[in-house]
Image (spheres, grey):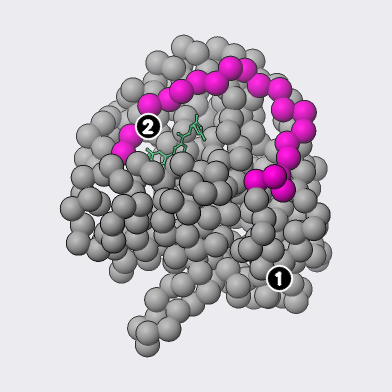
């Protein structure tokens, strides 16, 4: 929690105002932040200085794992997070590639599970990484990348957390995740949960011990209409100790994640938190 609060404070103390053309808003911005999560000791990095909706964050990530490309599918498993980008952004609404209500196009999970090859086939990046790790193999390229510049024009948003790189040292699994752009009040609250949970899940389904997850962020920002709430409300609160995440041990394969897993398979223990804060969202 301290590293999150330190980043928020650093943006307020050292941030530079940057105009953002896509949203039409200014962002107070810093470059480069390195966060670490102790998955080995189950120190779940849930924000405690406001109520955090961790089930929606996990649901969003399960949607990526399943290769979803439609906001309605995300809603069905408990995440409303793609409604606005799929249905309210003018540029995407006018994009000829958009296939109707709720379509997100070729974003995140589509790239992770079905990256288009020039010969007409597809690459399932996640399957390859799971199979290798399960066999105890780390070829130093256990990478899942959602970042496909050749198809940016076919999706509603470029991926923000765009690359996940797994590493095996003995029987301990590590994850390094890269994020190009980070909405610290809203997005990071979810992204911390997702990086942690991705390592915990991958360790569980490949039969390894989880180690640390490293989260590397490039552009970390607070939108101008979020600043007051962050500076004068959230940062005035004292954090509580980290809670623990319990994952149903019956989840043992990628197929389990693709088929029957729901948000009831994830429970958080000892979550003490302050009141919710509703931050403005920029489409
Ligand atoms: N401007 C912006 N910030 C983001 O963080 C973001 C995007 N756009 N677009 C794509 C996804 C969608 N994400 C989202 C979208 C909404 C919430 C959100 O509204 N969170 C609320 C309530 C969540 C709930 O009730 O389930 C929160 O208080 O955390 C969070 C992340 C993260 N990403
Ligand atoms: O997982 C996510 C997804 C999105 N965001 C934020 C970061 C930015 O504020 C916007 C995306 O805008 P771009 O103009 O494409 O950078 O969404 C996030 O923090 N986490």
Residue 142 in view in this figure? yes
Q: Looking at the image, which is closer to me, 258 or 3? A: 258
Disc marking residue 205: none
Please rate how many residues cluster around mark 1, counting C-alpha atoms within 10 Å: few if below 14, some from 14 to 19, many from 20: many
Q: Which residues are magenta?
A: 263-283
**Residue that badge 1 annotates:** 133
**Could you say whether the residue bearing mark 2 is in a helix, strand or loop?**
loop
Instruction: Find residue 75 and report its horizontal and vertical position in percent.
Output: 48, 46
**Ligand 2 in which quarter:** top left
Q: Which comes sooner in the sequence, label 1 or label 2?
A: 1
x and y percentages locating residue 64 in the rendered image: 52, 57
Residue that appears at 60% across and 72% down: 127
Image quarter of the N terminus? top right
SS category of the residue bearing label 1: helix
In the foreground, 242 or 31: 242
At a point 43% along the width and 83% down the height, the residue shown is 121
Image-quadrant location for residue 256: bottom right
Q: Is residue 188 magenta?
A: no
The answer to whether mark 2 is within 8 Å of ligand 1 is yes
- On whether ligand 2 comes within 8 Å of the CB at mark 1, the answer is no
- What residue sits 61% from the left and 40% below the top? 55
The x and y percentages for residue 217 are: 48, 45
**Location of residue 237 in the rendering, given as x and y in whole percent from the top left corner:** 59, 14
Look at the image and say whether residue 279 sits in the magenta stretch.
yes
Is residue 120 rendered to the left or right of residue 198? left
Whole-angstrom CA distance, mark 1 to mark 2, is 37 Å
Residue 191 makes an appearance in the image: no
Q: Is residue 251 left or right of residue 181?
A: right
Residue at the location (32% across, 24% down)? Answer: 224
Q: Is residue 50 left or right of residue 43?
A: left
**What mark, if any, has residue 281 been given in the picture?**
2
What main secondary structure does the magenta stretch of the protein show? Answer: loop
């Amino acid at each position: 929690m301290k590293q999150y609060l330190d980043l928020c404070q650093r943006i307020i103390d050292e941030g530079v105002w940057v105009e953002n053309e896509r949203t039409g808003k200014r962002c107070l911005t810093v470059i480069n932040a390195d966060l670490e999560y102790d998955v080995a000791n189950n120190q779940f990095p849930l924000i405690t200085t406001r109520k955090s909706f961790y089930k929606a964050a996990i649901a969003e990530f399960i949607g990526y794992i399943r290769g979803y490309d439609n906001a309605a599918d995300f809603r069905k498993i408990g995440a409303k997070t793609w409604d606005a980008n799929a249905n309210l952004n003018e540029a995407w609404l006018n994009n000829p590639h958009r296939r109707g209500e709720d379509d997100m196009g070729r974003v995140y999970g589509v790239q992770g599970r079905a990256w288009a090859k020039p010969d007409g086939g597809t690459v399932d990046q996640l399957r390859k990484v799971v199979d290798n790790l399960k066999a105890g193999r780390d070829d130093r390229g256990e990478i899942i990348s959602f970042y496909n510049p050749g198809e940016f024009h076919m999706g509603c948003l470029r991926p923000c957390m765009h690359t996940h790189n797994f590493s095996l040292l003995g029987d301990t699994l590590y994850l390094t995740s890269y994020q190009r752009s980070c909405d610290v009040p809203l997005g990071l609250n979810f992204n911390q949960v997702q990086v942690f949970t991705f390592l915990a899940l991958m360790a569980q389904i490949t039969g390894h011990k989880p180690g640390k997850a490293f989260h590397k962020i490039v552009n970390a920002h607070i939108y101008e209409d979020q600043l007051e709430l962050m500076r004068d409300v959230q940062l005035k609160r004292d954090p509580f100790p980290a809670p623990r995440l319990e994952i149903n041990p019956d989840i043992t394969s990628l197929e389990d994640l693709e088929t029957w897993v729901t948000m009831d398979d994830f429970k958080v223990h000892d979550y003490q938190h302050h009141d919710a804060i509703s931050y403005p969202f920029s489409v």
